[in-house]
Every structure is written in C-alpha cells, then in structure tokens.
Image: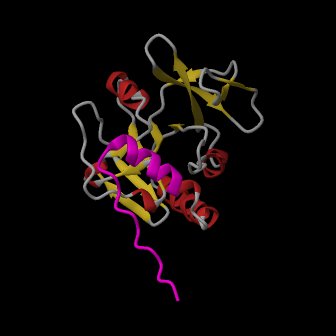
C-alpha cells in the first residue's frame, strides 16, 4: 500500500508560486464542484451590496467564471451593469466596457475576449481574479500589474473583491510596495477575508 504524498510546500519565489498554483488549479479534480460553490457564495455576498455597476473579467487558465452569477444579479434590477476589462495599450491600465450575454466580442492584444463597441463605465465594485491570496487582502496575480496600475488611478476607487479557489490560500504571502490590497476575498469556502466596516 502506498501512502499519499504530502502537499507541496508553496514556493517562496512568486514566479514559481504562480506557476505552481495555476498548475494546481488546472488539475483540481473537484474544480466544477468548487465553481458551483463559489457561484453560490458570490451570489449570496452580492445580495447585501449597494453597488449597481460591477467590473468583472473573462475567465482564463482555469479561473472561476463569475459571469453566470453576475448575469443573475443584473437580471434582478435593470439599472445594474456588468463590465469586462479592455486594456489601454499606452498606459497598460484597464477600462471597463458593458458586457451582457450575446454582446459582440473581439480579442484583445493578449487573446482574451473583450466587448466590442459597448459603452465604457466606472465600476463601483470590481471583481478581481486571484492566482493566490494571503492574509489582509493580499492578492497574487499573474505579475503584469494591470489591476494595481488601474486601481492606483481610479477615482473614486471601487470596492475590490478577489475571487479564488481555497487551494490558493498562502498564509505567508505579503504585499509588496506596489500591491494594492483587496477589500474582500471570496472563495469556494465562503468569505475568506473582508476589510472591517466594508
């Protein structure tokens, strides 16, 4: 009888940690079940929120797809709008353009679908994909800095909510000088963290 291998200790090198967590996310045998749980957690979390405009993302590399629960959220009130990011080439910042099921899409410079020809708007709440996350709202992304650059200039700053599968929790992860901490993190296990008085 062979014993199961102990889980790998997450790498302390962020580049290696990103690769490791992405590989783990892609190989989660229960990823569909986790996705369904996270959809429910997000749907319930949104019920108590006052924001009417939400910036989201097109899921890539095994990320959680927030669009189905967001569409259900938007159906409940015609004033609610969902946006997807469009990268500004000059500043490498994100703008958010209205998205709805069936809207015309085109690929951006990175091969990710974006809305074509829809109105830009400033989201009051921003859902951010996490490769990993740590205490106090620390997010590990892909390393491109798009969200940090965008959040540094958006006024008023939207409420930021990281979305992640719970396997991506790294207890020793710390923010670097350029990192903008999230206001909350929601995982398939529930509300993982929230800034007080949010």
Assess whether residue 42 is covered by the magenta stretch: no
Residue 154 x %, y % = 38, 24
Q: Residue at x 39, y 52 (%)?
A: 185
In percent of width and height, residue 58 lies at 61, 38
Residue extent of the magenta highlight: 1-24
Camera sees residue 197: no
Q: Is residue 44 visible?
A: yes
Q: Is residue 28 left or right of residue 172?
A: right
Residue lying at 25% horizontally and 55% vertically, measured from the top left:
172
What is the image's colouring?
secondary structure
Identified at 26% across, 51% down, the residue is 136
From the viewer's perspective, tell me whether residue 161 is left or right of residue 73: left
**Residue at far bottom of view:** 1
Q: Judge by depth and name the residue closer to the eye, 151 or 24.
A: 24
Q: Farthest residue to the top: give it.
A: 90
Query: In the rendered image, which quarter is residue 169 located in?
Result: bottom left
Query: Percent position (x, y) of residue 33?
Result: 61, 67
């Amino acid at each position: 009888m062979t014993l199961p291998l102990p889980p790998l200790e997450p790498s302390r090198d962020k580049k290696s940690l990103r690769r490791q967590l992405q590989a783990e996310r892609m190989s989660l045998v229960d990823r569909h079940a986790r996705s369904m749980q996270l959809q429910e957690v997000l749907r319930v979390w949104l019920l108590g929120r006052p924001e009417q405009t939400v910036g989201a993302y097109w899921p890539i590399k095994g990320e959680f797809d927030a669009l189905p629960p967001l569409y259900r959220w938007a159906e409940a009130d015609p004033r609610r709008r969902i946006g997807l990011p469009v990268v500004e080439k000059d500043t490498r910042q994100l703008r958010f353009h209205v998205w709805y099921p069936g809207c015309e899409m085109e690929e951006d410079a990175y091969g990710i679908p974006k809305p074509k020809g829809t109105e830009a708007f400033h989201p009051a709440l921003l859902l951010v994909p996490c490769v990993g996350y740590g205490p106090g709202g620390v997010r590990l992304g892909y390393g491109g800095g798009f969200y940090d650059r965008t959040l540094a200039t958006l006024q008023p700053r939207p409420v930021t909510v990281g979305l992640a599968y719970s396997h991506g929790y790294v207890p020793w992860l710390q923010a670097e000088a350029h990192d903008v901490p999230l206001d909350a993190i929601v995982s398939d296990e529930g509300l993982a963290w929230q800034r007080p008085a949010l």
